[in-house]
Structures are given as C-alpha cells and as structure tokens.
Image (cartoon, grey):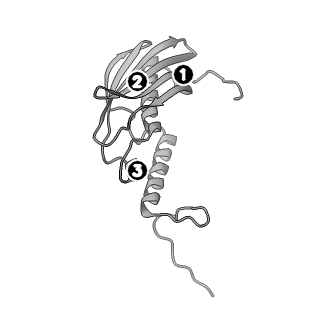
Amino acid sequence: MTTTAPRTGAAPARTAPGQTTTADDTAVRAAALARARARAAGAQAVPAFDRLLELVEGERAVAVRNVPATLACFTAHFPRHPVLPGVLLLESLTALARAAAGPGSWQLAAVRGVRFKHFVGPGDQVHLTVEVSRHSPRQTECRATARVGDRVVATVRALTLAGATTTREGTA
C-alpha cells in the first residue's frame, strides 16, 4: 500500500526538461494567470491608465499612467533593471484609443509602426496621447504617442480598432 502526501498550495510550475524554476518565476506565472482570469471575468487586474485628462470623441484623447514599483512584472522584467514591458504600454494606448473612438465595443484589429524608444521604469509617469486619423462606425485608426517628461518613449503609427460587430476575413 502506498500513500501520498496531500497537495498544499499551488501546483508546481511546468518547465522544459533540464530547466529549473525559481520562486520568482512561479510568482510571475501566478500573477499572469490571475490577470488572465480577471480579464476573462470581464474585470481588468491592472488599470490601463490612471487619469483621463482630455477626451474629444472621434478626435483625440490624453491620459496619464503612473508606473508603481509594486507591479508584479518588475520581478522578472528585469530583476536588476526593472522595465515596464512594451506590451503593457501598448495595452494602455489601446484602451485610450477605445475611449477616443467613442461609444461602442471596439476590438484591437491591427497595430503598425510601433517604436519603443526608451525604457519606462518604476516611478515614471507616462503621458499617453491618441489622435484619431480615420473614423467610421466600423473602423477607427489612430496615431499614438507615450512620453515620460519631455522624452518620447513609444510611438504607434497606426492603431486600428474594429467594431465588435465587424467580421474580419478568416473569422466566423
């Protein structure tokens, strides 16, 4: 007769053969899983921006995002030189573009010409600006810029949003 110890805590992290994992890796994976579950439930774990400064629907939007040192991503990205992942900055710009597009349910359809020019770290305050270049009931295209102080840290040449009812090629 064999007995096994009861399982306590979280399941062990899966790794490739020969690869080891640290407690930090497990914590980062757990935080990512929690954010994914929150999004699936309709909530957002981390706000895309903190304060909306200006909004002219169909034309322009300006917001501010504060980058606290307590974000879970800083433990692994990168431990000795924490950097806000570019995808989180792009997510903030997308959320601001949705606000600028106006009422309705907008989905990200395409992003072109993304340039990350400088690092964004803990304690930075990012000023996000989105300008609508084309707008219709089915599709909105915007230009976006992120700045820390006077320094441009990221630009997006074309951020395209599609209305939720718009079907795209190759989808059902």
| Residues packed near mark 1 inside 10 Å, few (<14), some (14 to 19) or many (20 plus) | many
Q: Secondary structure at mark 2?
A: strand
Is residue 163 placed above or below 48 in the rendered structure?
above
Q: Residues under labels 3 and 2: Cα distance?
A: 24 Å
Q: Quadrant of residue 52?
A: top left
The residue type indicated by label 3 comes to: Phe
| Residue placed under numbered mark 3 in the picture | 78
* Frontmost residue, 48 versus 137: 48
Q: Tell me the CA gap for discs 1 and 2.
A: 14 Å
The x and y percentages for residue 61 are 38, 19
Q: Earlier in the sequence, mark 1 or mark 2?
A: 2
Residue 11's spot in the image, x, y percent?
Answer: 52, 64
Label 1 sits on a secondary structure element that is: strand
Q: Is residue 103 something one can see in this rendering?
A: no
- Give the number of the disc on residue 160: 1
Q: Is residue 166 above or below residue 50?
A: above
Q: Which residue is mark 2?
A: 145
Query: Which residue appears at 42% of the width and 59% of the height?
Result: 24
Front position among marks 1 and 2: 2
Q: Amino acid at mark 2?
A: Thr
Q: Residue at x 43, y 22 (%)?
A: 144
First reached walking from the N terminus: tag 3 or tag 2: 3
Q: Position of residue 50 (x, y in %)?
A: 32, 32
Q: Mark 1: which amino acid?
A: Thr
Asked if residue 95 is positioned above or below residue 34 in the image, the reply reads above
- Mark 2: few/some/many CA within 10 Å (<14, 14-19, 20+): many
Give the quadrant of the C terminus.
top right
For marks 1 and 3, give the one nearer the viewer: 3
